[in-house]
Amino acid sequence: MASLDVMSSPSLAQTIFSFQRGKSLRILIGAFLQSCEKLEKRGFEYKRLGCTDVLHQFNGNLRIVEYMLAYKHPTVSPAAIDCAFISGHIDIVCALLAARNTVRQLCRPSDATKPNDTLVAQVLRHNSELLLELFAAYTDVQWDGEALRVALSSEKVTCVEYTHGSRHAEGLPCFDFVYAQCRDRPGALDTLLDDAARLSPLYIVQRLHEDGLACTSFAMDAAARRGHLDMVRFLHLHRTEGCTVAAMDTAAARGDLAIVRFLHEHRTEGCSTKALGGAVANDHKDIVCFLLDNRGEACSPRALDIALTNCRFEMAEYLLQRCPHLTYADHGWHMTLLHGPLDLIIALAIRQPLRPAPYTLNKLFAAQRPEVVAVLVNHGLITWTFDEVYAAVADEPGTLELVATYPRTRDLVVAAALAKGLLPLAQELLALGFPLCVSLDTPMMACLGSDAGLPTMELLVAHGVPLQASWLDRAAGENLALVEYTHTHSNGACSVMALDSAVARGLDDVARFLMAHRTEGCSMSAVRSCITRDDDVLLYELCATYPNVCDERALMAAITETPQQKLQAKYVRWWCQRRGQSDRDAFVAALDLGLNSWAFQSLLASCLSSNDPRDNLVFLSSITDAVLQRGLGPRSWHLRRALEAQALSSTVRTDAAAKALFEANELTAWAHYVLDATC
């Protein structure tokens, strides 16, 4: 806000206020502060690391802060102290801490004295020991390894030259302070030397080493990853933990030959194939040469593929000369065909013939690299299948040039144009006498799902191509006009998929047309779709038209195959309504249909009234024997739970005899016993 910037400048504010007749500077400041929003509660993320409050916007102006503390108590809160620490204004911190005795709004709750990690990190970045002492006295901060890591990575760390016997700590008062607090804290220093090797200059690592701190092999790995040769050398000479293969791997990836050479000459851990892979990916040829000459274990079988994938084509040519056994995979070949030099493509095509993927051909023709296509054709890597012609077909000039160059594509270009929805191109090709002598199933399945579906059908009919009834299966999921045209101009049978697709897509007009004009029928899938989207009208029409599909056993099979309980409940309700029976009568009738556990549970739940637990117990007791007699023992678990739940909801016997019967699984006897008399 511009007004806040003005108020932050005492000289500019004085100049403006001098023209305000009848009002003093103090009154104007007070009125402005009164209109400002209250400070955010502690615990929320402050804007720009915590500083959205009025105090911070005044850029540490102590006079205005003192005025607010004296006259405008409602505009301050404990968050003001947090923001003062974050901003690093020590004079304001001292003023706010001193004012806590007189300004109650600055006193934070007793349970809010432990700062979060973000606040601790922002205080540490100021690298002020006095600020840290005030912060430690003000909060219940627990200095730990995380605080030490923040201190090590502070922006204020300066690389002071280390001399033996002296510790230059001028740049690290925050680290010194936190380090002193953590010396006696168990576990706080466990990984400190490792973290220092990753984050700090060498003299910090030397200091911690002299203090007797332990480290792991991660320390030298981290130093190598940073490219810090002096630190690697120090750890090698003075520590025994060593390193892992990651040290040389990461040094090779970042192109640090000095560290790679040092580790090779002085360490025995070696490297892995990641070393060569990283060097190849980042185009460090000197590292690659060194590894191939000196580290046999570094030779990665994927090195050539990594070079090709990252478009390091000069590196790939070098690897082909040095390591003839290397191979490549689809993605590396893809990048080479699109961006690589022709000589390399020819060499790879001879050495390891690999057919390009269809998506590669699409991009290759779009990139207009006919010389690459010619290489692939000459080496038998493109044989002009339908997929390959489909990838090549574009506009009329490009397609005619393709056919002129490769006559074998002539028989497929019309079908490919239809599949791509390029109707004008297909018309031109047919007018020029190009044949339609291949199966159109694949192209028609593609174009029927687009706006070009009906015009394509009309074009085929106009050229005497018979429509196939099987295309009706695909057309039924689109629109009625397409279905009517296909039905009129085709012979043969489609499948139940046509009506199933129409019902599933909610195309009721298409579904009714198929029911009226086709005899293929539908499957249980159409019934499920109707039940799922609550289309009762179409559902009863299907049941009336195809009674054999919608019988009870088929519906119960659908319930059994459906894992969602909500859909099962819908199926159950519709089944009961169709039978014209009550839920309980329908449940008894359904016991012979081989219910699975889910269907049994759904049906049982629909039979229980929420208003009369005792009546539910009577019903459950009446069906217990029927469930057990039909070999539905595994379903008795649901029955037991239902009995137990209804018993808890009603007034029945709950004595030891009842408990014994229930635990013995004598459910019928238990139900009669508890219902015999009320408690």
Image: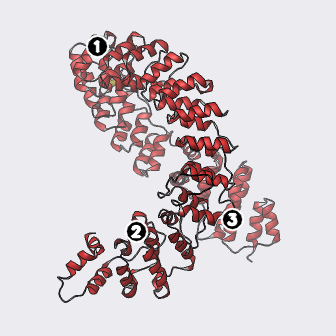
Amino acid type for the residue under numbered disc 2: Cys
Residue 436 image position (x, y, % from top left): 31, 16
Q: Which mark is residue 51?
A: 2
Q: CA distance from mark 3 to mark 1?
A: 82 Å
Q: Is residue 41 visible?
A: yes
Report the mark closest to the observer, 3 or 2: 3
Q: Secondary structure at mark 3?
A: loop
Does 216 appear above or below 303?
below
Total marks drawn?
A: 3
Q: Is residue 271 visible?
A: no
Classify mark 2: residues with Cα within 10 Å, few (<14), some (14-19) or many (20+).
many
Q: Earlier in the sequence, mark 3 or mark 1?
A: 3
| 85 vs 107, nearest the viewer | 85
Q: Earlier in the sequence, mark 1 or mark 2?
A: 2
Classify mark 1: residues with Cα within 10 Å, few (<14), some (14-19) or many (20+).
some
Q: Which image quarter: residue 497?
A: top left
Q: Secondary structure at mark 1?
A: helix
Residue 2 image position (x, y, % from top left): 25, 69
Quadrant holding the N terminus: bottom left
Q: Residue at x 43, y 50 (%)?
A: 533
Q: Residue at x 51, y 31 (%)?
A: 279
Q: Which residue is mark 3?
A: 184
Classify mark 3: residues with Cα within 10 Å, few (<14), some (14-19) or many (20+).
few
| 252 vs 351, nearest the viewer | 252
| 615 vs 67, nearest the viewer | 67
Residue 274 image position (x, y, % from top left): 57, 32
Q: Which residue is mark 1?
A: 403
Does 430 appear above or below 631?
above
